[in-house]
Image: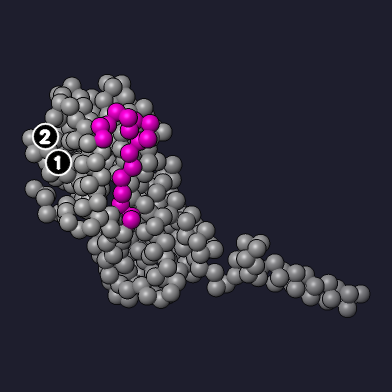
Amino acid sequence: MKKILILGLALCMMISFVGCSNDAESGEVSEDTFKVALLLPGTTNDGGWNTTAYNGLMAIEKEFGAEVSYTESVPQSDMEEVFRNYAMSDFDLIIGHGFEFGDAALRVAPDYTDAIFMVTSTDISQEPNVISLLTDNQQQGFLQGVVAAIVSETGVIGGVGGMEIPPITADLQGYEAGALYARPDVEVINVMTGSFDDAASAKEQATAMIDAGADVVMHDADHAGLGVIEAADAAGVYSIGSIGVQFDLGDKVLMCGVTDMNQAFIEMAQKVVDGSIESQNYIMGVKENVVSMEMNPDLLDEVSEEDLAEINGIYEMIKSGEIVPADYLN
């Protein structure tokens, strides 16, 4: 009987071992599987900033067969702890999605040098294992401003930002610069609501702009931006979205400035996998196909061919480097 029990235990151990081995077809995970974690300041269903990062994480999972994990709505008080938990679980790449994760990453990284800590929307770096990814928000805003100014009939446009943090400030600065580049006499009304969640406040701000003559309103305010889109729909004027393609959120969303985190995250993950990653700031924009613009196909017949040609021409000049949006900031 004892021999039978021993054989049975050995068989169970063999089954367990086989069950944990790497098998590409079965999707099972091995000890040397690439592991990537993502820390988010908000929820994955905000349709903007956090959604695009989540989509980027899913792209990494698909591209590399990676094991992935994420934590939503991480408060500042918990950032260091969440970073440490992922590092202690042997994650290879740990991403803090937003400049606000920078200080925590810098504190935790020296204790876990086998992991790469990446923070987005900042320019920090620290040897040997802290890097940053800065998507060019000024370029995104510039494109949004170009479109808004060109299609505006009143010569007044508005922009609503969420919290006054570097990526949002950069977008609104680019928005004004792009509008003035395309139409020097345009009036640009920009405001910050101070929140990424208060859609009612954003709607009030957008409505006030529309009452002041704005016939195009842009938002870069995550969930709160829904209020801007609602205000535009109610008034029958155009809205412009940010980060993701948001045409399904309203009837008058004419254009979206898009940041493709899929492309950016895959490029950075590839550098980690092949060992070419360096402790530095990586900047990606239109040239790298990370920042782009999308025009709503359902509303294109409302924009003249001449205006579309001008918009596309400016986009191509930014991509080629002939226009550098940063040169036009006030």
Which secondary structure, mark 1?
helix
Q: Pick the quarter of the image with the N terminus.
A: bottom right
Residue designated by label 1: 182
Magenta segment includes 290: yes
Please name whichever residue, 301 or 276, is drawn nearer the observer in this view of the structure. Answer: 301
Q: Which residues are magenta?
A: 289-305
Relative image position of residue 219 (x, y in whole percent): 27, 37
Relative image position of residue 66 (x, y in whole percent): 52, 63
Residue type beneath disc 2: Val
User: Colour mode?
Assistant: one colour
Extreme-right residue of the structure:
1
Residue type beneath disc 1: Ala
Please name whichever residue, 26 or 325, is drawn nearer the observer in this view of the structure. Answer: 325
Mark 1 touches mark 2? (CB < 8 Å): yes
> Residue 3, relative to residue 99: is it above or below?
below
Query: Dot 1: within a 10 Å radius of its alpha carbon, few (fewer than 14), some, or many (20 or more) residues?
Result: many
Relative image position of residue 304 (x, y in whole percent): 25, 32
Quarter-of-image position of residue 210: top left
> Residue 240, relative to residue 232: is it above or below?
below
Which secondary structure, mark 2?
loop
Left or right position of 257 against 38: left
Quarter-of-image position of residue 12: bottom right
Please name whichever residue, 55 or 69, is drawn nearer the observer in this view of the structure. Answer: 55
| Disc assigned to residue 186 | 2
Magenta segment includes 138: no
